[in-house]
Image (cartoon, rainbow, N blue to C red):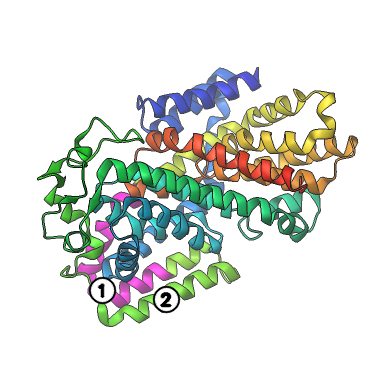
Amino acid sequence: MLTILGFGMIATFLVLIMLKKMSPIAALVLIPALFCVFVGKGAHLGDYVIKGVGSLAPTAAMLMFAIVYFGVMIDVGLFDPVVRGILRFCKADPMRVVVGTALLAAIVSLDGDGSTTFMITVSAMYPLYKRLGMSLVVMTGVAAIANGVMNTLPWGGPTARAATALKLDASDIFVPMIPALAVGLVAVLVLSYVLGMRERKRVGYLSLDKVLDPESETVLVGAGVAGAGAGAGSASGETPHKASGGGADASEGDDLQGLDSARETLRPKLYWFNALLTVALLTSMIMEWLPIPVLFLIGAALALTVNFPHIPDQKARIAAHADNVVNVSGMVFAAAVFTGVLNGTGMVKHMADWLVGVVPDSMGSQMGLVTGVLSLPLTYFMSNDGFYFGVLPVLAEAGAAHGVSPLEIARASLAGQALHMSSPLVPAVYVLVGMAKVEFGDHTRFTVKWAALTCLVVLGSGILFGII
């Protein structure tokens, strides 16, 4: 019964948010509360929620101050050269913009933190997508999938969890998987190329000089695309921007604040201070000198104090980013209700046991493949901690009974990470959709199919290369 209710709760949540019948925050709170009553554990709901909130509170604190920090860095112009450089490299070509998004997300993912990756990627690329009239769900989808593939780095989390759970060396798990993960990254670039070509067909080209001048009225250049931006919808299902004179609306210039050289918040004399502060912050995160929430708290305080020494200016900057802070931290605390009920009622354990139990004995020798396939839904519907510490040891034990090495099981378990990064249980995804101003349901509907395909490419490559 708990298995059925668990899958029913997750399915209800996904259907309601994808059909936009409920907001993600409301769905994350009300649906698990309702199912908790169905399970007969309504009297324990408070305990489950408090425990869930306690486990996610550090993440919420980190996101709050990280949003303020990177928001201030955008305000003062730290990322302006990056945006201009990417724009010139992309030559206002939507295809190059999407490929550039994948590359940027993959490179920034080297720090091992998904939230930071999404904040930097969206900060750099959002103005460009808005100015060109491109689909924002393409940006969030490509960024999430690229980050998911890179999330398998030993310091990213899943590999370390698998090594710890099975008492293996992380390098023995990760190093042999590099060829398969490299193929997965190539698959992301191919996907971004295909999606970019769709966007190019839909919105056409913009004059580079027009794009760089936010005060100008942009015009589409290129044959046969004058009406492309005014169709019923894009390939991703997002409504295109209105056209003005055959191109993007001139009012969209307000969305290119990252390139507005006249904004009052710019601090060109403090550019190198801000750059060094950001490098020091990211270095401290990688070296784990302090907990990440503490680092961002200190970083945000320093950034505000140095760049805006007057208290009214500091208040204005905090207020300017308050929407993002409230939306993202609210999502995290709401997700705590969802995870708290899943774990507290035992639904997640019963779901995992059922999935493992349905594997026939005849598939015992193929437990590597089974683990890889199961990693897609399991890491999507539960946290990495739940999967790697709760389910993976069971899969490894079943594999060992049929002569399958725990190393193969551990490597196969990494296959689902491209999909995991868009799970409603991953706080970082709310940073991504919140900063990009994309509905979570739209992101999910667009991304899941491509992320699952990327996971299967990684798994198939691992099997083909004899790694799994």
Q: Main secondary structure of the magenta part?
A: helix
Viewer-nearest residue: 364 or 337 = 364
Residue type highlighted by circle 1: Phe
Mark 2 residue crowding within 10 angstroms, few (<14) / some (14–19) / many (20+): some
Q: Is residue 323 magenta?
A: yes
> For mark 1, what is the residue?
308
Q: Indicate whether residue 52 is drawn in magenta.
A: no
Q: Residue at x 30, y 80 (%)?
A: 270
Corner quadrant of residue 401: top right
Pointer 1 and pointer 2: residues touching (CB < 8 Å)? no
- Report the residue marked by disc 2: 277
Please indicate whether residue 5 sits to the left or right of residue 87 in the image.
right
The relative height of residue 273 versus residue 335 in the rendered view (above or below) is below
In which quadrant is the C terminus drawn? top right
> Which of the two labelled residues, at mark 1 and mark 2, occupies the earlier sequence position?
2
For this view, does 409 lie left or right of residue 98?
right
How far across and down, in percent of the image, does residue 195 sit? 40, 43
Indicate the position of residue 335 as horizontal and vertical percent values.
48, 39
Distance between the alpha carbons at the discs numbered 1 and 2: 15 Å
Q: Position of residue 455 (x, y in %)?
A: 60, 41
Amino acid type at circle 2 is: Leu
